[in-house]
Amino acid sequence: MSIKIHTGQILHFLSAVTHEYFPSGALVTEDGKVVTCGDKESLLARYPQADITDHGERLIMPGMIDSHVHYPQLDVIASYGEQLLDWLNNYTFPAENAFKDPETGRSTAQFFLNELLKNGTTTAMVYGTVHPQSVDAFFEQSSALNTRMLCGKVMMDRNAPEYLCDTAESSQTDSQALIDRWHKKGRQLYVVTPRFAITSTPEQLTAAGQLLKDNPDVYLQTHLAENKAEIAFVEELFPERKGYLDVYAHYGLLGPRSTFGHCVHLDDQDLKIMSDTGSRIAFCPTSNLFLGSGLFRLHHQPSPVSVSIASDVGGGTSLSMLQTLNEAYKICQLNGTSLSPLEAFYRVTLGNAESLLLDDRIGNFTPGKEADFIVLNPAGTPLMERRSGKCTSLEELLFCLMIMGDDRAVAATYVMGNCLWNAMTDNEAKP
Ligand SMILES: [Zn+2]
């Protein structure tokens, strides 16, 4: 039993509208779990035997969470000139083909997880490729780091190159085998992953629905209403359905464990159905801008829908959730609303945990939570140091971090109480 204390500025959220901030604070952990956090002086006095790490003036926060990202697309981030469907055909599908080789999966997963940790992201909901070995490779690497990750094998049996297609039957068998192998093994969680309605036959969407029925506590992720050409194609493929969302509804894919990437072009009636079924949206600002998909209206909530924030690399342009917040802020500005710094940091920590139904385990520093946390350095670059030196409130400091920050603002990343990334000493994460 070793009690550890980390001192610095401490910030965490208790709800969407409540946070705790200790300018001279301490976080106490034991055996990878949070014991408590609070004022430094009193906690140092209460735990005189603790092992102390002093982070100075730096900001200690829960690890950030990314609710939609494709690890096999690292090599097509920053690919020029296309919108969604051509981008998939010209860049993404050829790149995903390499993952038939398990070694590509292993080395890419290792690089990807290392990048997440450098960027202060400790949990992500991740797409593999159609190859089951891409998911084995990912979970093997994540298990070695003991990170809490969600991942699934892409199901895709039409409108994609032959070499990337499975079948309705094989996708169900392979997904079930991965669920049996990985779901709830340590910190790993499985996500049923039909890519989107365009690349799945009705038979395959039926199989996806069956997987959810057979395994009621796994997750589902897919894409929805990202781009106008995509929506038109779905309507052509499923003329008998009332619209794109109705395709997923028909096959039993809606619900609180289901996260739909993008949803840029849903109307109020769709949002009502999302709300009534408890379905989740992942807002992917850098991707929506990069692919020219449209401006998601984060604060337009005619019916309450849980919205998480995500990078969507490789359509997205940065794994940094700070950079993701930067672009989210600008999209809100264009929509005539403001993403406040407190709302922003709530969203990438506790808010995303709530959206993924993981807030009983991660997302803040209440007692018993898994001790995944980061140390942010507001002086990560000379200009940030200069600008943050002028900040006179927590809100100003957070805003500076979310607009100017990236991996250079992440000084250290801890997973279950262990330091896996330290910007001063590491080149890669330590399992
Ligand atoms: Zn995506």
Image (cartoon, rainbow, N blue to C red):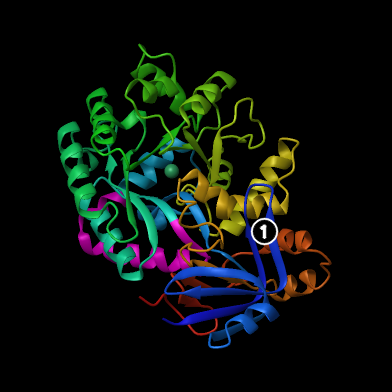
Quick check: 131 left or right of 399?
left
The stretch of residues the image draws in magenta is: 95-123
Magenta-drawn stretch contains 111? yes
* Mark 1 burial class by Cα count in 10 Å: few <14, some 14-19, many 20+: many
Q: Residue at x 48, y 67 (%)?
A: 371
Q: Position of residue 157 (x, y in %)?
A: 23, 33
Q: Residue at x 78, y 61 (%)?
A: 396
Quick check: 399 left or right of 306?
right
Magenta-drawn stretch contains 25? no
Comparing 359 with 70, the one in front is 359
Residue 112: quadrant of the picture? bottom left
Quarter occupied by the N terminus: bottom left
**Amino acid of disc 1:** Met
Image: 374 above or below 344: below
For disc 1, the marked residue is 402
> Of all residues shown, which one is farthest toward the front?
46
Comparing 294 with 168, the one in front is 168
Q: Which type of secondary structure does the marked residue at label 1 adopt?
A: helix
Q: Position of residue 378 (x, y in %)?
A: 69, 71
